[in-house]
Image (cartoon, rainbow, N blue to C red):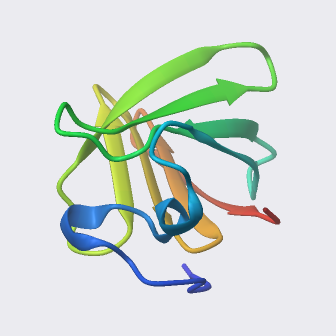
Amino acid sequence: MQFHHRGVVLGLGFASMFVAVDAASAADFDYRCEDGTALTATFSPPSPEGSTAQLVFADGRTLVLPQVVSADGGRYQKDDVEFWIKGKGAMLTVAGKLTNCTTAD
């Protein structure tokens, strides 16, 4: 997968997009995936309780994934769903099926 780096990645895998986000707000990004999946991801700001990514799919399904440790990028996972972001690229894995996604935001 090809990633496009847009900024500094913060420690513990916090995504670079949080650099410009106010601590009291969340950031929304629209993603389109190679398999046709469309989703909006809302990333909570870093906090001691842990960050999350809320994924809202085009069909209305919503999942909230807690952030997990990552050496690079931001990785969010719950059960059989993983959303791993870096720059404008992402990998979405659902039930073992992986697709690459990108955002223009």
| Residue under the image location 44 percent in, 23 percent down | 64
Quadrant of the image occupied by residue 78: top left
Left or right of residue 32, residue 69 in this image? left
User: Whole-percent x and y of residue 51?
Assistant: 33, 39
Whether residue 57 is situated above or below residue 88 in the rendered picture: above
In the rendered structure, the answer to whether residue 29 lies left or right of residue 80 reads right
The residue lying toward the viewer, choosing from 35 and 81, is 81
Which sits in the foreground, 90 or 80?
Answer: 90
Position in image of residue 15 (x %, y %) = 43, 64
- At 47% across and 71% down in the image, what residue appears? 16
- Answer with the quarter of the image where residue 87 lies: bottom right
Q: Nearer the viewer, residue 23 or 95?
A: 23
Q: Nearer the viewer, residue 37 or 48?
A: 48
Identify the image quadrant of the C terminus: bottom right
Place of residue 88 in the rendered image (x, y in percent of width and height, measured from the top left):
65, 71
Residue sitting at x 79%, y 17%: 59
- How many numbered discs? 0
When the figure is inspected, residue 46 is found, relative to residue 17, above or below; the finding is above
Say which residue appears at 62% left-offset and 85% top-offset.
4
Instruction: Examine the image and state in which quarter residue 99 appears.
Output: bottom right
Quadrant that contains the N terminus: bottom right
Left or right, 102 with respect to 7, comes to right
